Amino acid sequence: MKRSKNFYLILITLILAVYYIFIGVYLNKLGYTNHESLFYIEKGKIISYGLGNKLRVMGLTSPLLPFYGAYIFSFINAILAPVIASGVGTAVLFYIMATSMVKRNKDNFYLSILVILFALHPGLIYTACSGKGIYMVLIFFFLFFLNMLRFYNSNTTYHISVASICFVLLVFSDYKCIWLALFFIPLVLSISLHSLNLSEKESVFRLHMSFNNPSLRRKLVNKTFSIYSIIFILPIASVAIYKVLNLTHADDLNYFLESPYATWNIIADKFEYSATQVASKFDIPEISVLVSLKAIIFCPMIVLAIYLFKQNTYQILTLLTPFGLIEFLKVKYDSVNLTYEYYLLFLILALLCIIFRVRFIKNQRMLKAGLVIVVAVQLYIGFVFLSKSYIKEESNFSKILLDRTSNKVDEENHELADYINSMRDTDDPILVDDAVAYSVACYVNNIQKLTMPYQESYLSAIEAPEKYNGYVLIANENNPTLGYTQLTDFYLDGIKRKNPRLYIYKIYVTDYWTLYKIID
């Protein structure tokens, strides 16, 4: 019996998932970690095993979808859950793209290109094996643009509705992607203009005619507003509702964006993604305009993708919207380097265009030869971008992947957590501020040992330590996150002045942390 192509796609997907998980687990054992995965591990442990009111942690941890994507696998292994999630998620992304390609093109050459990229491209390996939520962003980014291109072909509003749902999911995977809506305004205007029944074919003249005719101008405005509303009213409404939820449960509309208890980005943006590092003379600096050039160098395939749609105005406008997004992000968040995630968007978009358009190209031999060269170049450039990244957790990934030796970035967090795990007097709680200490808390086996800010008893323990009689984890002066926590040496000085009879002594010391015992 002849097996269907879908069977082989499922088989390749399973092989890729195992391949990704194996590499991810191996790198994790070597010592690779990042802020995002550690944050998800700690919050997942709170939900599963913590004591106290966990509603705020369950509903307001951001970004929401990648967090729950990792949490689903925490029942297999809490520490490896983000790695398993990213491996499985990236394999799912391959399956979605591969099925889209097979439906439109029977040539196995292009499927082979897709398999090679997912198996060897450093950026996609980083997506799959780092434990970060990039895979979720790429999935919904692909589905959003896929349905937009389907709408252009069929002119069916169903595809716009599906695209709108995908955009909601994209925003809840990475809130910064909401700014993509700004750059769809000229695109929606172009679509509305094209739908008008005019004899003139050129867009500029159609626009001139529409604005100079009151009836046509009214139709154009109504069509533009209606299409834009169908695409973006659901995402905007969803974000508004989520902000009200934040206001209700955290007394802050932007709690999910601005609180270190809700998102890992606060610490990462300050200490990992900072743009204050000096570039070498061979690097392209991340400044406005040059960011787009850097994206093209990273993904030369996007030039081919734009060429494939050279006769379709609004398809080209669609392909240009991510350029507008990264330029806007660089201006708005000028103190932060763009992460590898935003450059990968162009790779996914280029592959989507190939899925849609290559079957219409007559000279297939020339196209395939060119595509092989571009893919080879892109694999090399992808590695260069990762290994030379200004962001430590990205360059560290490349280094560990090649050298297979730990960079010991997370060694002292493990060391401190191991000591806490070995403590026998489990009845005495440990006061921990997980705004900065989540990298320690995530490795603690029994999360119930820790008293943390989500619990009502936390404020009482801070304000009246003489009634606490437990332990407190203090951030040392060398700790780069010192300014984001109340539990510092100044706090100890304050409670000593308040209660001179309080006896405080050191139990365990590392470069960044000191564990104290408090006795009244």
Image (tube, rainbow, N blue to C red):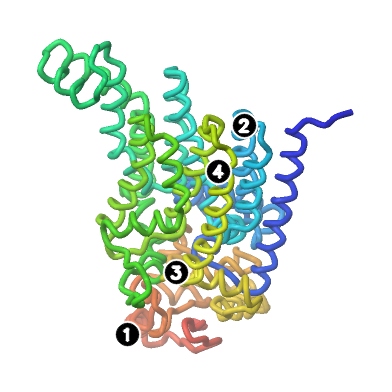
- Distance from disc 4 to disc 3, alpha carbons, whole Å, reads 34 Å
Kind of residue indicated by mark 3: Ser
Q: Quadrant of residue 152?
A: top left
Pair 4/1: label in front = 4
Check disc 1 and report the residue beneath it: 497
- In percent of width and height, residue 209 lies at 15, 18
Mark-to-mark CA distance, 3 and 1:
47 Å
- Among numbered discs 4 and 3, the one appearing first in the sequence: 4
Q: Disc 3 or disc 1, which is closer to the eye?
A: 3
Q: CA distance from mark 4 to mark 2?
A: 17 Å
Closer to the camera in the image, 275 or 148? 148
Sooner in the amino-acid sequence: mark 3 or mark 1:
3
Q: Nearer the viewer, mark 2 or mark 1?
A: 2
In front: 124, or 284?
284
Q: Identify residue for label 2.
A: 105
Residue depth check, mark 2 versus mark 3: number of the one nearer the observer: 2
Q: Earlier in the sequence, mark 2 or mark 3?
A: 2
Q: Which residue is mark 4?
A: 366
Task: Calculate the distance from the C-alpha at mark 2 to the C-alpha at mark 1.
Answer: 75 Å
Instruction: Say if residue 155 shows up in the picture.
Output: yes
CB atoms of marks 2 and 1 within 8 Å: no
For the residue labelled by badge 1, is the local secondary structure a helix, a strand or a loop?
A: helix
- Quote the CA–CA distance across marks 2 and 3: 36 Å
